[in-house]
Amino acid sequence: MKFSDILGNESAVSRVRHLIDSGRLPHALLLHGDAGTPKLALARVMAQYLHCTNRSGGEPCGVCPSCRQHQSFNHTDTFFSFPYLKRDESSVCDDFMPEWKEFLSDNPVVEDYQHWLSLLKNENSQPAILVKESDSIMRKMSMSAFTSQYKVLIMWLPEKMREDCANKLLKLIEEPYDDCKFILVSDNAKAILPTILSRTQRIELMRVPMLEIAGHLMTTYGVDQQQAMAMAASADGNVSQAVRMLHADNENHEFHQRFVELMRLAYMRDLAKLKLWSETVAEMKREKSRRFLDYAARQVRENFVRNLATPGLNYMTREEEQFSVKFSPFINEQNVERMLGAFDRASAEIQGNGNAKIILFDMAVLTTILIKY
């Protein structure tokens, strides 16, 4: 990978390149920003650039032995730590390296946490960085660098590190060996234990502009411009979300059908069928039903914007546009905020392990009232 592969965030890229070129890369650097920003990709390029023996034009050369080792995820002085599932008392990240290498291969531009869960074979799991991993990290970082000047540990999602693990790593992160560099990559810096956070220097990455996401979809996946713009707008700066939508056309079609069904039944105030609708959506399980609610909220926003009669502000697929022609007049300034609030509240309650059938039926009944405003 190269710095030029990083979508958006020219300022952050320039800053980390300068830190390495000037020999001022801190011993512990935190790259943080919203999910779907290319933080892990930037961390990987940083490690490759740091180890490259033939840098050229502010980029790793891509052909020296160190670069080739990075490209195959086999660099002897680069280590990864990430959330994983406990298989037994001795479980560490190294036990999941085949899945991790597949994850990095599948997500070269931006990481996707949902894809990582799918590779762990349990999308409802709560992986973490466990205390045994701290012993593995300390052992690796205590050894001298083998082929390079520096050893690099890239830790993805340090906010998922257990407190007992973090406590064992505090001294190493605060007073590391001279040849150690830690690059932490976080979706939520506020959730990192303060004792770890205070020992890092921080660089924030911003959401990727819509046009850059659309361009990435068109260039990399051959998506037509209308579809790319619709997906990029829906993703709201989250590249992994845009790519996920691209690979989930069947899911998007299903969500659209469920949304249309909800609005039609709500307009007819058919409570019996809305109850059946709620039960059907609840069977999607927690994460998928929350993705549906996010989709529904976006459709409400897009239909409200459509009423402004400014086509350049709308980003819909052809299927969505066809429904919107007759539906959009029902979304107005009297009901749009309350409807969005209902979807957001339902999503939060489902995330909190509430009864999805009751939550969704409650939301559907409220929709019957709001749609007639």
Image: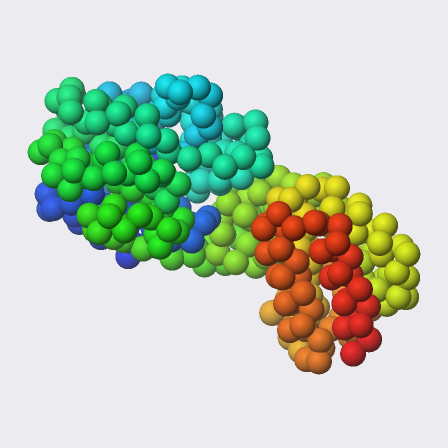
Q: Position of residue 281 (x, y in %)?
A: 75, 47
Q: x, y percentage for residue 86?
A: 45, 25
Residue 74 place in picture, x, y as percent: 31, 21
Residue at the (88%, 66%) spot, across then down? 269
79 to 287, vertically: above or below: above
Viewer-proximal residue, 124 or 267? 124
Is residue 10 shown left or right of residue 53?
Answer: right
Whether residue 186 is visible to the viewer of this picture, yes or no, is yes
Reply above or below: 350 against 106: below
Q: Which residue is pictured at 75% across the width and 54% down the height? A: 358
Residue 346 placement: quadrant: bottom right
Where's residue 27, x and y in %?
Answer: 16, 41
Residue at image point 34% right, 52% down: 189
245 sits to left or right of 268: left
**Residue at 90% over, 56% down:** 272
110 and 86: which one is in front?
A: 86
Q: Quadrant of residue 65?
A: top left
**Split into 4 quadrants, where in the image is the N terminus?**
top left
- Side of 9 relative to 336 (left or right): left
What colour scheme was applied to this rendering of the protein?
Answer: rainbow
In this orientation, which residue lies closer to the viewer: 123 or 19? Answer: 123
